Image: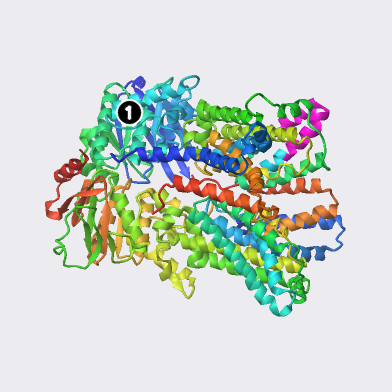
Amino acid sequence: MPAADIIVRLDGVEKHFGAVRALDGVDFQVESGACVGLVGHNGAGKSTLMHVLAGTSAPDRGSIVISGKERRDYAPRRAKQLGIRCVFQELSLCANLTVAENVRVFHPALTGMGWRRKAATLISEKLDAIFPGHGIAASALVQDLAIGQRQMVEVARALTVTSEPVRLVILDEPTSSLDSHTAGQLLTFMRHEVANGTSFILISHLLGEILGYSDRIVVMRDGKTIAAGPADAFDREKLVAAMGGAQGGRGTTPAGAAARGQKPLRVRVHGEADAPELVAHEGEVIGLAGLAGHGQTAMLRAIFGAATRRRAGIEVAAPVALVAGDRQSDGIFPQWSIARNINVGSLKMLRRGALISPGREQALAEYWRGKIAIRTPDMNDNILSLSGGNQQKALFARALASDARIILMDDPMRGVDIATRLEVYDLIRQEAKSGRTFLWYTTETDELLHCDHVYVFCNGVIVANLPRGEFSEEKLIQSSFQGAR
Amino acid sequence: MVLPQALPHIRRLMRALLPAFSLVLVLGAIAYLNPRAISYFGFNLMLNLAVPIALATVAQMFVIAGNDLDLSIGPFIGFAGCVTATWLHDSPLMGAIILAGCVAAYAALGALIQLRSLPSIVVTLGMSFVWQGLAILVLPKPGGAPPDWLASLMSLQPPLVPFPVLAAVGLALIAWFGLMRTSYGAILRGSGGNASAIARAGWSLLKIKMALFALAGLFGVLSGMALIGITTSADANIGNGYTLLSIAGVILGGGEFMGGIVSPVGAVIGALTLALAASPLLTFLQIPPDWQVGANGAILIIVLAARAQIGRKGALT
Amino acid sequence: MTALKTLFARPWIWSFVGAALVWLAAILFTRFNGAGGMLSAALALAVFTVIVGVGQMFVITLGPGNIDLSLPANIGLASAVSMTVMNGSDSRIALGLVAALACGFAIGAANYLLIRALRIPPIIATLSSSFIIQSVDIAYGRGLQIKPPPGFAGFTEMQIAGIPVLAALTVLFTIGAAIALQRTITGRSVLAIGQNMRAAYFAGIKVERTCAATYALCGMLGGLDGALLAGYFRGANVDLGNEYLLSSIAVVVIGGTSVAGGKANLPGVWGAALFLVLLLTMLNTFGVSAGVRLLATGLIIVAVIAAAGGERALR
C-alpha cells in the first residue's frame, strides 16, 4: 500500500503507567477512507492507544507517523491541525456552556464578531445531518441535555470543520449512551463519511457494531495488537476467541424458574393511573428494558430511596443494594483501596464491638477477590489501579457482599468486556438461585435473555410486560416504539 | 428522549431574575419605610459604597468562575486603597507601577495555584495575611488622601441618574460582555465547567488561570481606588469586610462555587442588594446597633434560601 | 532507612518539621534561653487551635464546599454561656462545660439545618449564622465580667513536669478521633461522603445523618474551646475566637487534610498548630512590627503549602 494512503501509522509504541504496561509495542495503521474497528477487553490498551493518537498522552517509546512524516512533540493542538479528532469515552463537554460555546472551545478559529452564530450554524447543520430529528438547540446549556443528547453533541462536534481538516475521527464507545435507533443513525452516517474519504477508528464492546460497520478489524490484548484483518474474515466467535474471552456470549436460558407469584413478594411499584405495576419476587431476575432514558434509572432510584424512607406507591420488603452504571460519578470512592470500596456496603457486619475489625475486613475482601475474580496483585491497592471492568466487578462485590436481598442494577455492564460479563452473568444466576432478587436495567437486548421477566419502559411508564417465554427482540422494539410515537 | 425540555429553562429564568427580584424587594422595603429615600440624593447616599462593593464582587466572580475562591480579596482591596491614598497621591507614576504590580502578583498567584495544583482557599488565606501586613507597612496609621481626579470622579453628580447607578450599569455591561459574550470568555468559563476538556481541546489551563486571577486583581485594585475616592482617607483594615461581601454577592447573583457557573449582571445586582441591605435598610428599620450584624446575617439567609428553593434541582434521591 | 522514608512520605511530617525549624530559629535567636518554656507555652496555646482544628477537619473532610466559618462566633458565645453558668463557683464547672457543649451543639445543628433544609452553601450558611450568633453574643454578653472559677482557671494552665495537662488530654482526644475516623461506621461514612457523595448514598451510607452529626460535632468542639479559652484567658469575650477563623482552616490544610474532601489527617493538625504558634513566638522574639509579622506569617503559610504541593490527579 502506498504511504500516501496511510493517514496514521504507529510503530512499536510503548506506554507505561508505573509497573503497568498499558501499551507494549503496538504497531497500528489507518488507511484513508477506511473504518478500523478496534476491539479488546477492558485494560487491553485501547483507550491508552487513543490518547496517544489524540496527543493527550505521549508514548514512552516508538514513533507516530502522520501523513507520511514522523511527528515529534505531538500534542492535542497539533493532532487537531493534522485533522485527527477524538471523541473520548468520558464525555468532554463543558456542562456550564451552551452547545454553541462548546463548539467554540473545540475550534480556535471561531473568534471575532458573530462567532456565536457561526458556531451555532456549524453544529446545528452537523446534528441535522447525523441525527435527523435530534431536537437539540445550539443555545441549550449542556447541563440541561440528557446523557444521550450530550453524546450526540460530542460526536457531531468532532465532525464540524472550520480552519482545520477532518481526516481521521476516533470514536471511543460512541454509542454507549445512545439507544439503538440513534446509534444506527450515527453508524450509518459514519459509513457515509467513509465513502467520502474520511477515516474512522471505531471502538466498541458491541461486536455487532464492529462486524457490521468496519472495513478492517484490529484486536488488542495485554497492550499489544494480536490480530488484524478485513472485517469479513471475522465473525463473532472468532473475535471473542481472539480477544481471549470465553466462547459463547449469547445468554443461555437458565432452567425454568418457578411460576410467578409462588415465592414471597419483594418489590411492588404501583403504576400511575392505569399503567401496569412492577412486581418482583424472591429469586427472580427482572429486566427493565426500552430506549435509553425512559424512566428505568428513575424507577431503580425510587425503589432504592423507598427502601430507607417510606414512599407512596412503592413496597420494598427487604434490604436493597444498588450497582451503579456510571462508575465514576455514582460508584467509586477514588481515594480508597479495592478492599475498602467493597467493604463499605457491609460495615455493620465487619464490626467487632464498636470498631471495624481490620482482620474481618481483609477476610471479606479476599473472599470476593476469589469469588468474582478481581484481577489485582493486592486488594489494598487503590481502586483506580484496576481496569474499568474490574472496577465494575468490585462494585458488584460491594452489593453482593452486603446483606441486601434485592439488588438493583443500573445498566452496570456499560463498557465492560465480554469475559467479565459472562462471569457476572453466572454470578447473578447463582445468587438468584439462593433467593436474591435482581432488578436489572440494561440497554443491551442480549442481557434481557437472562431475565425471568421483562418490563419495557416508555416515557417513564411500563408499556409492556413480557414473561420469559414471550420475550423476543422484535417484541421489545415494537413495544419500545409504540409508546414513543 | 421526548420529556419536556421547557422546565429547566423556566427554572433558569426564574433563577436569573431572582437577584433582580431581591433588589426590588429591598428597594420596596426602603420605599415603604422612608419614601424620601427613593430620590436622586437618597440613592446617592444609600449607594455610596455600592461601587467598590460591586467591583469587589466582580473581582471575586472571575475567581469563582474558575472554581476557586479568593479569601484575600478584602485585605487586597485594603492594600490597594492604602497605596492609592499614599503613593498614587504623592507620586502618581510610582503608585501606578505598584498597582500594576498588584495585578501581576495576582496573575502569579493564579500560576502558582495552577502549577502546584494548590487549594485556592488556603493559598488566598495565607495571602490575606500578606496583603494585610503590607497595608500596615504602607500606612501604619489611618490617613492619606486620594488623588484629586479620583475624589472628583467618585463624587460626580450626573444629571437624572445618580453616579453609583450609572457606574454599576456600566460595570455590569463590561463584565457581562467580557465573560459571557467574547469567545475567550467562553474558554474562561469552560475551565470551571470541565478543565480537562478545555486542556484536551488544546488550551493552556495555566494561561486561563492567570487571566482569571489577573482580572480579579485588576477589579480588586479598581475597588480599592473607588473606595478611597469615596472615603477620602485610608486605613489598613478598610477592605476587610469585602471578602465576605464579595462572595455573598456572587452567590446572591446566581453564581455557584463549582462548575464555572457565574452571572456578571447578577453579581452586580447582588452587590447592590447587599449594599442597600447592609446599612440603609437596617437604619430605616431602626434595628438596634447590637443586632445589626445579626440582621445582616438573617437577610443573607432569607435571600439565599429563596434562591435555593427556586433553583432547586431535585434532591439526590 | 526505609522507616525514615515511609515517615517522610506521610503528609503530616512536614508540619512537624516546620514547627521544629521555627522553634530552632527562635531559640537560636535567644541563645537557647527559655527553649523549654517556649515549647510548653506553645503546647498550651496550640491546644485551643487543635480542638477547633479537629472539628473543622471533620467538616472539611465531608467534601468540597463544606466548611464552618461560625467557629469564632461560636467560641465567643459559648465562652459567655459557660462563664455565666459556672458563675465563678468551682462546684458548677461541669455544669458550665455541659452548657458550652450544648450551646455549640445547637449552633452546629442550626448550621446544618441552614445547609440542608434551606440549601444554602455551607460557606455562606455558616457565615450568616455567625453574624447572628455574634449579635446574640453582643446583646447577651454586654458588660459580662464574670471570672472563671479558680479551679477551672487553674486546670487550664496546670502543668506536670513542664507538660500542660490540657495538652496531654487533647493528645488523647486526637488519638481517639483518629481511631473513630478510620474504624467506626460514622468515621468511614465521613470519608466516603467526602470522596463521592452520590456514591456514598448509593452504597447505603446515611449521608444526611452523618453530615448533621459532623456539623454538630464541630459545633460542640467550638463550644468546648470557648469554655476552655475563657478559663485560660480569665473571662469571656466576644472577640475571644476571632483568630480561630483562619487558624482552624490553616491547621487542617497545612496538616495534610485534603480540601477536596475524603482524606483527613489528625497528627497533622497538631503539627500545624504547633507550627503556627511557634511561628508567632519566633516572630515575637525577633521583635518585628505587626506589619512584618503578618507579612511573614502569610508568606510562610503560602510557601509551606506550595512546597507540600496539592493532590496530583491520578493518571
The quarter of the rendered structure image containing the N terminus of chain C is bottom right
Chain for disc number 1? A
Left or right: where C166 falls relative to C118:
right
Mark 1 Cα shell of 10 Å, populated few (<14), some (14-19), many (≥20)? many
* Vertical order, A393 against A2 (above or below): below
Q: Quadrant of residue A241?
A: top left
| Magenta stretch encompasses residue C187 | no
Type of the residue with mark 1: Leu
- Is A273 positioned to the left or the right of A157 in the image? left
Residue C160 falls in which quadrant of the image? bottom right
Task: Report which quarter residue B176 is drawn in.
Answer: top right
Residue range in magenta is B78-103
Nearer-the-camera pick, A251 or C284: C284
Q: Residue at (26%, 40%) from the top-left corner?
A: A179
Q: For this rendering, which residue is in front, C291 or B75?
A: B75
Disc 1, SS: helix
Q: Disc 1 designates what residue?
A: A127
Q: Position of residue A111 (x, y in %)?
A: 49, 22
Which is more toward the observer, A53 or B33?
Answer: B33
Residue at 62% in and 62% down: C54
Specify whether A23 is left or right of A414.
right
